[in-house]
Amino acid sequence: MYDFTGKHIRHDFEREDLLDVISKRDTYVVDSNSDWKKVCMENPDKAFIITPALSRENPNTKDLILHEKRSKLGNIFSFGIDANLRCILIDRIDEAFHYAFDNAKLTEASRGKGETVAKQKAEMWNAIEVEKQKIRDIIREMLARMTELGKVPIGTAFINSGRGADLPPYKETQVMADAFKTIIKQLQLAPESKHHVSKSQKLGLLCYATLLLEDKQERKDEGTRFEFDCPQYEHVFGDMYIVQAAIYLQARILTRDKKLQQMAGYADVKCFHLPPPIKASPHN
């Protein structure tokens, strides 16, 4: 357990300082659009991070975290924010992790059933709406500033509706996207970056807002703006949460997803399909 500035909160049941363990390894936050299940088996010396975003995309939670072979590796870690306890929770997913669960309830949840699943979905929808409002406010503020300077046409439609589809066309919002990129770079230069929740969250929101502005939306039924407006798309911020985790841990991302790579690139987070090989020492 860690507070929102990365300070270790000790408790009676911990065996090691996992944030320290992860910090000493080549670390990758994993995306579902990758071969992470195979890669983690081939790279026991690296750390692979499972976020709530990945858990929501995986239909079988039991297989994700308690797989017979993967749970013996000791190089997979779960990472998430506990809003109720106001702390970061990190677990090493190993054989001992099995005992943290009620097997019957976990089996039920892995099938998408049970009271716990329903409660989690309700909490998730509330969280999504909160995130959407934050992003709307970020863009509205920049849109108003740019309109005053005469750099973009009046964005009254988006200011009123908050819908991605009502944003000005991509060519007109590029100047705003560039301004956000500058802000992101400035934030990264500040000292309190690693293991700092509020900063990683702010950077994640700015990265998503930039992606929204740079969406060319060549088709009306796809793209970041379309997904932002979808009322029943529970994975709308999955990539953003992966980027936030990577910023917090100062880790890389394992993915093939082009949009995730684009968003991560705004914050200089490196993405790979496969981990780069470790360079041999010239003295070996």
Image (cartoon, rainbow, N blue to C red):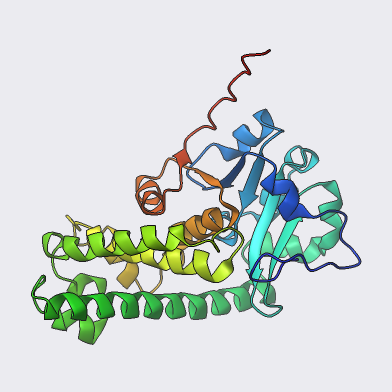
Residue 57 or residue 90, whichever sits in front: 90
Picture quadrant of residue 193: bottom right
Q: Is residue 170 left or right of residue 73?
A: left
Nearest the eye: 67 or 265: 265
Tell me which residue sits at (67%, 47%) in the image: 23
- Apparent side of residue 7 relative to residue 118 in the rendered image (left or right): right
The answer to whether 141 appears left or right of 231 in the picture is left
Question: Considering depth in this image, is 99 or 84 the residue closer to the camera?
Answer: 84
**Number of marks in picture:** 0
Residue in front for this viewpoint, 201 or 68: 201
Residue at position x 71%, y 78% in the image: 85
| Vertical relation: 161 (above or below) 174 | below
Q: Which percent across, then down, holds residue 111?
A: 64, 60
The quadrant the C terminus occupies is top right
Is residue 279 at all visible to an observer of this figure?
A: yes
Residue at 31% in and 59% down = 181
